[in-house]
Amino acid sequence: MFKGRIARFDGPGQPFQIETVSLPAVGHGEILIRVSRANICGSDVHAWHGTFATRGLGGQLPTVLGHEMVGAVEALGDGVSTDSNGSPLSPGTRVVFPYFFPCHTCRNCLAGRRNACLKLKMAMLGRADQPPYFVGGYADYYLLPAGAVVYTVPDNVSDDIAAGANCALSQVMYGLDRVDLQLGESVVVQGAGALGLYAVAVAKARGAATVIAVDGVRERLELAKEFGADAIIDITEVPADRDRTKIVRTLTEGQGADVVVEVVGHPSAIDEGLKMLGQFGRYVEIGNINIGKTFEFDPSRFVFANKTMVGVSLYDPAVLSRALAFLDTFQDTLPFDRLAAACYSLDDINDAFAAAEGKRDVRASIVP
């Protein structure tokens, strides 16, 4: 019997309720994780507000939000002894895992598109009022289903650094994979929150010659420079999108960017980002997850310049292993520890979400 707390989410506009629940046993192939840290991602805030409806993905209420997490093995079900790389698992082993669970057998999974699994299951979509209860990261435990991909966290990578690996970091790594970012190319990152800062760092690590970060919060832009941005554009200082596009052209020798990554999460950024692209430029759309939002753009510019837009949802689970290696390699040279600006206990989760609405903290985190 495993007893622990969950922060039950009943619906948008309602406060989280802390409940103590019990899991009778860990089933065959399952892994019970003791959550050590769960970040408050933008999608969690959107779900809290109701602008990102988890029901639209097949989710149910009440549920437990939270997906960007790290934890330690509490108990292993029968048949589980190693992680997805073959490293041994035992109680106390620190792990991260994708927060979504493909079946590995449908046509999309077999075609190498596991993030588009036809039977995909995901954290935050299960019910919190029936077993196994521990269906999201804002809890003492999270139950990892049988067959899930899981990776051991390197000993020298702390929880506060590892927590962002299974969502923000893996997402942008996969996005840049999708557009095949090449050595010497130029990149614009729209938005310098956690996703944007990771995108800056990964782009530089992949050999981008010029990386330009665009945001309206000076503190974030200064941090973007520490993550490797060669130039920054503050939209409060350059309010006209036409002028911002001119700056990008100037910084890219008049050509425009090879790649633009959108992690602002507002459709108004898309038309501007497309204008910043040069010939054969590739636009990586990650941030807009709120259904029903639209934008206008001139398609002739898209056609005549041979531009491409790539929508990116989730990532191939194997990317997470590379994300851990990236953190291990660059943790001494990049300020990953500054991505989590504030920590809150599970009991204070309502205060944490209220604080997460402030635009200056890159990530608030729940530490149960």
Image (cartoon, helix red, strand yellow):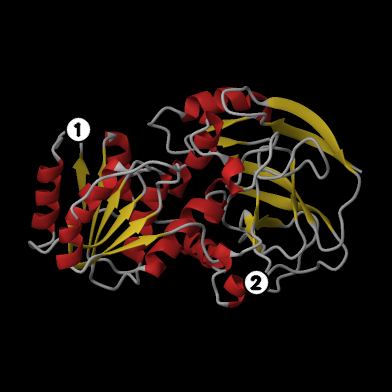
User: Can the viewer see residue 317 in this picture?
Assistant: no
Left or right relative to 53: residue 62: right
x%, y% of residue 222? 28, 41
Q: Residue at x 62, y 42 (%)?
A: 37
Secondary structure type for disc 1: loop
* Quarter where residue 181 is shown: bottom left
Asked whether 323 or 9 is in front, the reply is 9
Q: Quadrant location of the C terminus? A: top right
Q: Residues within 10 Å of mark 1 (few under 14, many from 20)?
A: few
x%, y% of residue 43? 50, 41
> Which residue is denoted by mark 2 in the rendering?
106
Q: Which mark is residue 4?
A: none
Q: CA distance from mark 1 to mark 2?
A: 48 Å
Left or right relative to 104: residue 250: left
Looking at the image, residue 125 lies above or below residue 101: above
Amino acid carrying label 2: it is Cys
> Which residue is denoted by mark 1 in the rendering?
236
Secondary structure type for disc 2: loop
Amino acid carrying label 1: it is Thr
x%, y% of residue 48? 55, 31
Looking at the image, residue 111 lies above or below residue 302: below
Q: Residue at x 41, y 62 (%)?
A: 175
Left or right relative to 94: residue 308: left
User: Can the viewer see residue 351 in this picture?
Assistant: yes
* Quarter where residue 86 is shown: bottom right
